[in-house]
Image (cartoon, rainbow, N blue to C red):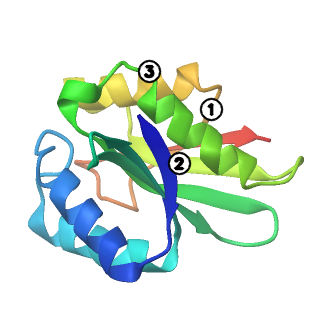
Amino acid sequence: MEYLEITDIKEKSMITNKILRKLPEWFGVESSIIEYVNEVTQMTFYVAVDKQEAIGFIALKQHNEITSEINVMGILSEYHRQGIGAKLVEMCEQNLQKGQVLTVKTLAATHPDRHYAKTRKFYEKMNFVSLEVFTQIWGEENPCLFLAKFI
């Protein structure tokens, strides 16, 4: 397994599109996929590669001097629970200075989706803490859980 930073805009978009389309349980809304594919071009982007194939990625958006956000992360299902997500998050953390804050948004526990229950468990394992649930971001039917971690 290799972990690389990708700077090429087209490659970032291609990897994001390829992986998100193979994860319909998490990324089933076409307009959201297109938005992510376009957004990642302007972000720090790390990829996990196995046998010369991208199998996971993470895109880090810097909001200001002290706050960065995991904008989107996707790992092919067959590679889940192998430490790949943890390694990608660690790469983001290494990009930040002590005292900075790393944030992420995901679907809140008040929504019954079992796939996002796994996502929340992952972030908790990575020492993120739940800060607040917002219904204004993605709507009442998709409550947004805002998590953060101090570096």
Left or right side of 118 for 132: right
Q: With respect to residue 150, does 15 lie above or below?
A: below
For label 3, the residue is: 121
Up-down: is 33 above or below 84? below
Q: Relative to 95, is 24 on the left or the right?
A: left
Q: CA distance from mark 1 to mark 2?
A: 9 Å
Residue 126 picture location, percent across and down: 59, 26
Badge 1 marks a residue whose secondary structure is loop
Q: Are marks 1 and 3 in contact (CB under 8 Å)?
A: no
Dot placed on the residue nearer the N-terminal end, 1 or 2: 2
Q: Are marks 1 and 2 in contact (CB under 8 Å)?
A: yes
Sequence-wise first label, 2 or 3: 2
Instruction: Tell me which numbered mark, 1 or 3, is placed earlier along the sequence.
Output: 3
Residue type marked 3 = Lys
Of residues 142 and 148, the one drawn nearer to the viewer in this rendering? 148
Q: How far is disc 2 from disc 3 in space, using C-alphas?
A: 13 Å
Give 143 or 102, whichever is nearer the viewer.
Answer: 102
Most foreground residue, 109 or 15: 15
Q: Amino acid at mark 2?
A: Val
Residues packed near mark 1 inside 10 Å, few (<14), some (14 to 19) or many (20 plus): some
Using the rendered view, name the quadrant where residue 129 is placed. Answer: top right
List the residue tagged with mark 1: 128
Which residue occupies 15% across, 43% down?
23
Q: Which type of secondary structure does the marked residue at label 3 adopt?
A: helix
Q: Which mark is residue 104?
A: 2
Q: Residue at x 78, y 40 (%)?
A: 150
* Residue 140 x/y as whole percent: 28, 51
**Residue at image location 31% in from the left, 68% down from the top:** 36
Residue at the image point whose x is 39% and y is 50% from the top: 57
